[in-house]
Amino acid sequence: MKKLLTFLFFSLPYFATCQEVIECGSGEDVAQLTITSASKNAIAQMQNPEPLVFNIYFHLVKGDNGNWIPSPSDPNCCFNTNEPSIMQAVAFLNISYNPYNIYFKFLGWDEIHSDNYTALGTEYQALDNEYGRPDAIDVYVVDHFTNFGSFPPGAYVPSNPAYSTSIFFQHYGFSDAHYTNTTMLHEVGHVLNLKHVFENYNNANAERVTRDTNNPVYNADTHGDLVEDTPAQPKNPYATGNVDCAEPFDMTATNYYNEPYEDIIAGNFMSYTVNCNRHLSEGQIARIRESVQSNPDHYGPLMNTLASLYQPWEVTPIAGDHIVSVEEIPENTAMLKVCRNLLLRHRFQTGFNYQFPDCSWPDTIASTPYVIPVVKMETFDFPVIIQQISNEATEIVKVNCTRGVICAEEPIVGGVLISTQVLGSMNITVEELTKIQASDPSLFETLMSEYYYILKKMTETGVVKERYFYKP
Ligand SMILES: [Zn+2]
């Protein structure tokens, strides 16, 4: 109980500003990958850059009992961490990075139930070793962090390269309010080898303000975030501590060397003010591309193709509307075995305007980025358009064999018994059967002999099994 109270106490200040403040747990030594080429070369290459597509996979890490630890909170802010909030994060990530020709292929999500990881400190390595996917950026949403002092960050990217393609969120840092998760943009930036734009701003290693490469103190290429076109800046350039861009920056602020800051632009993904004017600089994009090129062993396994974005992330066999067969089950008279035509439900990821030109209602025909498109009625291969990539249907989804059936046992909820002694006679008896009567294994024995019968048994979905017989 003591532990829980401590957790509540420290997390309450965080709830109040949950949506707006990024407190990122990546330290100053984040982004340790080396890069070989000069950033100016990479900028030149960016005139016609290859798209970069990264796989991403989510893990919701709860306790043994499958729950987050109960805590007072704003339910709209933080606690509905579930598939919809994951899909919102995927949408926002793509909307934010697609303008830079960077895409995220959603591979899916799972739920991990283990008390070992609800309070995450150094256990993050064991967690990632056990559950991490080698082919994706892993995003873990855990209950809460430990070992971060009194004010744990909302999210954490380890600086150790063996774990630096994984992102760890406290679940109240994984907010889905307003369909945005600015912390997600920021942490993915760390995974892509970007440092904070304010890196080392408050010590002797600070990036100098000058952009004049002839100035003797110029160090923008070797200090700060190692990106020349992001201005030197403090952790929070707003005088009041505000982060919502509603007021101008405090331009009287000075850096460690008492130089006034110049030309700071709000909203860089790698700042802590990401609530407006969200952007990356050309130099940051170049650094991402250089990092990918220089570290193929690190990034290669996570990468995918543009074509992969056209494929569903989940294909589930489902029953169609056509009933192929209904059978009684001799060993279980309370159920009927109902077989329907097999369909495949395809669910596509968020983040794009998908179009399915050959599909028709109730399947998705066109979607917007925050909608999960679903196609389940198609029995033939169907073409897919992603407007962000091309107006043409450049890819198709193969619908492999839907000729089978999918069967389920459905409980009997009632029935009707019609009986007559003489076929063709007007003298018939119709009796409604309750669930218990219709499911009764000894129903046949209770019937009168030398009668003809029609016995109808009905399931909760309205499927009827009808049987004609004569009891001698
Ligand atoms: Zn950070």
Image (cartoon, rainbow, N blue to C red):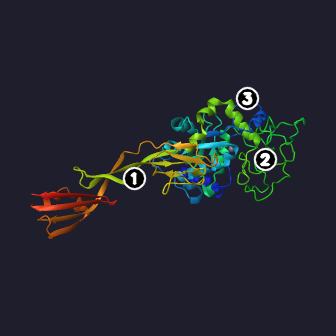
Mark 2 or 1, nearer chain start: 2
Mark 1 to mark 3: distance in Å? 55 Å
Residue type, mark 3 in image = Thr
Q: Can I make out residue 63 in this image?
A: yes
Tell me: residue 466, above or below residue 137: below
Closest to the observer, 223 or 230? 230
Residue under pointer 1: 320
Q: Residues within 10 Å of mark 1 (few under 14, many from 20)?
A: some
Residue sitting nearer the eye, 10 or 405: 405
Label 1 with label 3: CB-CB less than 8 Å = no
- Residue 428 rendering spot, x and y as whole percentages: 16, 69
The residue lying at 79 percent from left, 40 percent from top is: 203
Q: Is residue 32 above or below residue 174?
A: above
The answer for how far apart the CA atoms under marks 2 and 3 are is: 28 Å
Which sits in the foreground, 458 or 466?
466
Mark 2 neighbour density, 10 Å: few (under 14) some (14–19) many (20 or more): many
Q: Earlier in the sequence, mark 2 or mark 3?
A: 3
Q: Nearer the viewer, residue 445 or 64?
A: 445
Question: What label does residue 234 carry, if any?
Answer: 2
